[in-house]
Structures are given as structure tokens and as C-alpha cells.
């Protein structure tokens, strides 16, 4: 009954929109969208991943956030107002802006339904929040991948134990973490800046933290500045330096947010890009481009050459088995979809936490501690897990369809991370 009342209230308010759309505009809708998003963030800590708009808007949201019922009605009203602005007659970039707002509003409506207690299937949740419906394969479909990986790490014991023990050889000593990460991020930046003009004065601060369900995080501060944090709860392996340097930094989250601020928030005056709701299609673009950015910045054998020539000596690690280590990491990428299936079964109650941890060990080839951290992430972020593997596949397909040369691919990547890109845009090519 509570949900029915909320829906009826939303529809009643939406019905009144036609009386005021005559002078409506995407600019006005965008301002109201930002205010609504900030207020949802007051109802769910962590919902707003970044905000660098007017401080008074954040203050107003903090001082008097509307109820979930009122916010649900507002999302419906804003959707109706946006739909009332016909795309015909809009410039192509404004048509994309309109589509972006509609997608973000659909995600906000979905999240508000969840906050109100509505239970959605894993696929429904993913489609509502992130704009895609993931393919969920039976875990047995990944057994041939495990069989291929067996050849890379032969020996006694379970495959997960063998893989974990082998990867532990590549742990960066704690007192070497900062120089290794500093060097990796600098290299990622140099490779990105060779193809994408970065905003003048962009910068980041690097910190090391504990007690998180994630391994790395970018907190975008606005003004082309980021705070990048690395979680040291578990030993950090040498591969994470380049991974994180690209994913959280260049050409990943830091560059994406800086370009959106430069080109859309400031360049076009589109205030909706000054706020980033975590549970929205923006996250599939952000995580997918950040993951693909690793391969884009270090194609072919360039990663192995750079790591063995620079990072391994900084970490004090031998390089004899570096190629086999990277080959193992590359082979494990084919297991990314198994995480979606495990998350779906766990969140929908078909398996319990202990089983989810055990299956994560087996199909992600990690230790029990790392599997527990992975399930902690699912507990906290739910269907968000699809954005990494599926997002990466979608961005890769889009960028690599642009051509075979580095210039063509970097140009396509820049379009993805500096325009109002939606998952549907990646599939339109």
C-alpha cells in the first residue's frame, strides 16, 4: 500500500507538468535534477560519488532533504518534464543531453524504489540503475577457463590456492608502495597526455587507507583535482600499480571527471554533470572506460616491458616470471562474468554468504580473505559489479571499432569520456 500511494502521488504530480512546460528547458530541469540528487544523497550516504556545484545547493539539501516519497514524485515529475521537451529541433548534442537526463532519472527512480523496500531481481536492478541487462551464464560455463589456467600454475592443491600462492610472489613490500605507485601513475599520465589534452592545472593526491571493501577509489573534488586512495587491507601485488594508475587516474576516473567538468559543466554550462550519482549509467561508462584504459595505455608487450624495466626494480622484485604472471592475469579476465552469476545468486537468496565466498574463491581464483572482501563489495554495492567486466567489454568494442591505429582508438576513448555518453551509445555503432 505504501508503494502504491507513492506511485499515485508521483503520477498526480507528473500530470500537472503539462501546465508548466511551455517555458521549461533542459537547463531548468538540470538544476532540479541536481537538487534532487543531492537530497537522495542525504537519504543514502554514498549515493553521491562527487559534487562540485554551488555550495548553497548542497547546504539546502543537507538542511531539508525531502522524504523518499516526495523524491520519488520529483523523479517522476522531472522525467515527464524532460519527455515533454521534444528532441526534434534540438541540436544533436542537446538530444544526447536530453537522453542522458532521462537515463539518469530512470536510475534515480529505480534507486528510490529500492530504498523504499522494493525487491528487484539482479537483472532488473542492473537495467534500472545502469542501463544494461547482463548475461548470466551458469558457473559451469567457466570450467573450461579454469582448465586452461591449470596449465599456467601446475602443482598440488586447489587451483585457487596455487594461483594465490603464485601471485603472492609479486607482492610489493609495504615500504615500497608509494614510490611504485607514484611511478606507475606518472607513466599512465604521460601515456594519456600524449593523446588527450588534459585540463590545465589538473592534479591528484594519493593516499593509503584501510577498512574498505574496495581496493582503490577516486574521490573527484572538482577544479580538476582528485583524491585517489589505495586500500592496504590485503597485500598489494605489482600489477595493481599500473591497474590503479590507469583506472583511478589516467585515462580513468580522474581524466573522465576532469574532461566532463571542462567540456560539459563549464564548456556548456550543463550543471547536471557537476553531480555524479553512483547508482546510474554514468558508472558503467566510468568503470568500463577505466578498466579498458589499462590496455589502451599499455598495448601489446608494452606493459611487461615497462613493469620489468621500472616497477619491479622499484619494488625489489625479481622479473624472471613476470611474463607468466601477466599471462595468468590476462587468462583470468575470462572469468569476469562468473562474478555476476555469483552476485545474482547471492543477492536473490539462492546461495548464502559462505557459498558465495567459496564460489568466488573457485571462479575468481583468489584466497578466502580476498573472496570475503569481494563478497563484502557485493553486500555494499550489489549489481554495481557488472560495471567492471561488462562495461570494459562494451567500451572495448566501441573504441576498437573506430580503427586499428592508436590515434583512432584514443580519439574514440576521448569521445566516450568527455561527452554525455550512455551505455546505449556504445551499442549504437
Image (tube, rainbow, N blue to C red):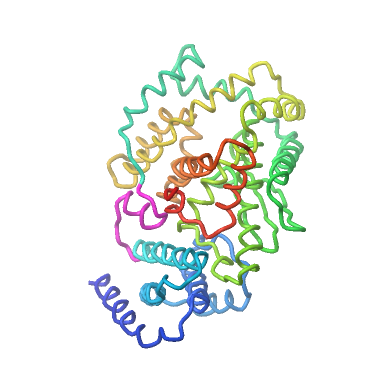
Q: Is residue 122 magenta?
A: yes
Q: Quadrant of residue 76?
A: bottom left
Q: Position of residue 116 (x, y in %)?
A: 34, 66
Q: How many marks?
A: 0
Which of these two is toward me, 119 or 7?
Answer: 7
Which of these two is toward me, 374 or 191?
Answer: 191
Task: Give me the residue at 30% from left, 79% from top.
Answer: 9
Which of these two is toward me, 106 or 369?
Answer: 106
Q: Quadrant of residue 273?
A: bottom right
Q: Is residue 287 magenta?
A: no
Q: Residue furthest left?
A: 1
- Where does the magenta region start and end? 116-133
- Up the image or down, 339 lies above or below 30; here it is above
Q: Residue furthest bottom?
A: 19
- Up the image or down, 189 lies above or below 335; here it is below
Task: Give me the residue at 44% from left, 18% from top.
Answer: 148
- Up the image or down, 112 lies above or below 401; here it is below
Q: Position of residue 348 (x, y in %)?
A: 30, 47
Task: Give me the residue at 41% from left, 38% from top.
Answer: 339
Q: Position of residue 52 (x, y in %)?
A: 63, 67
Q: Residue furthest front?
A: 89
Judge from the rendering whether residue 144 lies leftward or rightward of residue 189; answer left or right. left
Judge from the rendering whether residue 312 lies leftward or rightward of residue 368; answer left or right. right
- Up the image or down, 386 lies above or below 114; here it is above
Q: Position of residue 41 (x, y in %)?
A: 50, 67
Q: Quadrant of the N terminus?
A: bottom left
Judge from the rendering whether residue 217 lies leftward or rightward of residue 189; answer left or right. left
Which of these two is toward me, 179 or 373?
Answer: 179
Amino acid at each position: 500500500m505504501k508503494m502504491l500511494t507513492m506511485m499515485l502521488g508521483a503520477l498526480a504530480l507528473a500530470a500537472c507538468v503539462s501546465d508548466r512546460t511551455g517555458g521549461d528547458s533542459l537547463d531548468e530541469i538540470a538544476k532540479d535534477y541536481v537538487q534532487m540528487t543531492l537530497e537522495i544523497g542525504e537519504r543514502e550516504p554514498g549515493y553521491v560519488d562527487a559534487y562540485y556545484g554551488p555550495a548553497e545547493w548542497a547546504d539546502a539539501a543537507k538542511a531539508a532533504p525531502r522524504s523518499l516519497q516526495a523524491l520519488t514524485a520529483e523523479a517522476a515529475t522531472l522525467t515527464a518534464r524532460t519527455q515533454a521537451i521534444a528532441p526534434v529541433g534540438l541540436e544533436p548534442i542537446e538530444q544526447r543531453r536530453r537522453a542522458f537526463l532521462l537515463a539518469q532519472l530512470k536510475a534515480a527512480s529505480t534507486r528510490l524504489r529500492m530504498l523504499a523496500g522494493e525487491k528487484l531481481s539482479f537483472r532488473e536492478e542492473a537495467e534500472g540503475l545502469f542501463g544494461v541487462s547482463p548475461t548470466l551464464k551458469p558457473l559451469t560455463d567457466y570450467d573450461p577457463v579454469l582448465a586452461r589456467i591449470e596449465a599456467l600454475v601446475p602443482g598440488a592443491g586447489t587451483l585457487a590456492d596455487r594461483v594465490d600462492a603464485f601471485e603472492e610472489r609479486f607482492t610489493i613490500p609495504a615500504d615500497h608502495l608509494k614510490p611504485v605507485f607514484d611511478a606507475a601513475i606518472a607513466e599512465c599520465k604521460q601515456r594519456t597526455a600524449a593523446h588527450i589534452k588534459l585540463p590545465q592545472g589538473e592534479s591528484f593526491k594519493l593516499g593509503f587507507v584501510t577498512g574498505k571493501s574496495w581496493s582503490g577509489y577516486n574521490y573527484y573534488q572538482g577544479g580538476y583535482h582528485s583524491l585517489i586512495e589505495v586500500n592496504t587491507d590485503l597485500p598489494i601485488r605489482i600489477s595493481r600499480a599500473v591497474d590503479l594508475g590507469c583506472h583511478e587516474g589516467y585515462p580513468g576516473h580522474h581524466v573522465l571527471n576532469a574532461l566532463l567538468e571542462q567540456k560539459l559543466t563549464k564548456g556548456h554550462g550543463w550543471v547536471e554533470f557537476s553531480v555524479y550519482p553512483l547508482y546510474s549509467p554514468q558508472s558503467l561508462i566510468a568503470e568500463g572506460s577505466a578498466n579498458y584504459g589499462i590496455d589502451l595505455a599499455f598495448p601489446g608487450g608494452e606493459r611487461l616491458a615497462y613493469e620489468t624495466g621500472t616497477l619491479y626494480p622499484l619494488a625489489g622484485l625479481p622479473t624472471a616470471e613476470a611474463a607468466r604472471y601477466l599471462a595468468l592475469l590476462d587468462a583470468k579476465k575470462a572469468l569476469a562474468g562468473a562474478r555476476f552469476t555469483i552476485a545474482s545468486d547471492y543477492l536473490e537468496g539462492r546461495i548464502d554468504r559462505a557459498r558465495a565466498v567459496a564460489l568466488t574463491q573457485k571462479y575468481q581464483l583468489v584466497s578466502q580473505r580476498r573472496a570475503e572482501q569481494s563478497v563484502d563489495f557485493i553486500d555494499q554495492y550489489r549489481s554495481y559489479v557488472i560495471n567492471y567486466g561488462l562495461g570494459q567489454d562494451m567500451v572495448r568494442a566501441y573504441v576498437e571499432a573506430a580503427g586499428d591505429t592508436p590515434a583512432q582508438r584514443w580519439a574514440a576513448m576521448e569521445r566516450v569520456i568527455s561527452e554525455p555518453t550512455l551505455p546505449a551509445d556504445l551499442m549504437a555503432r
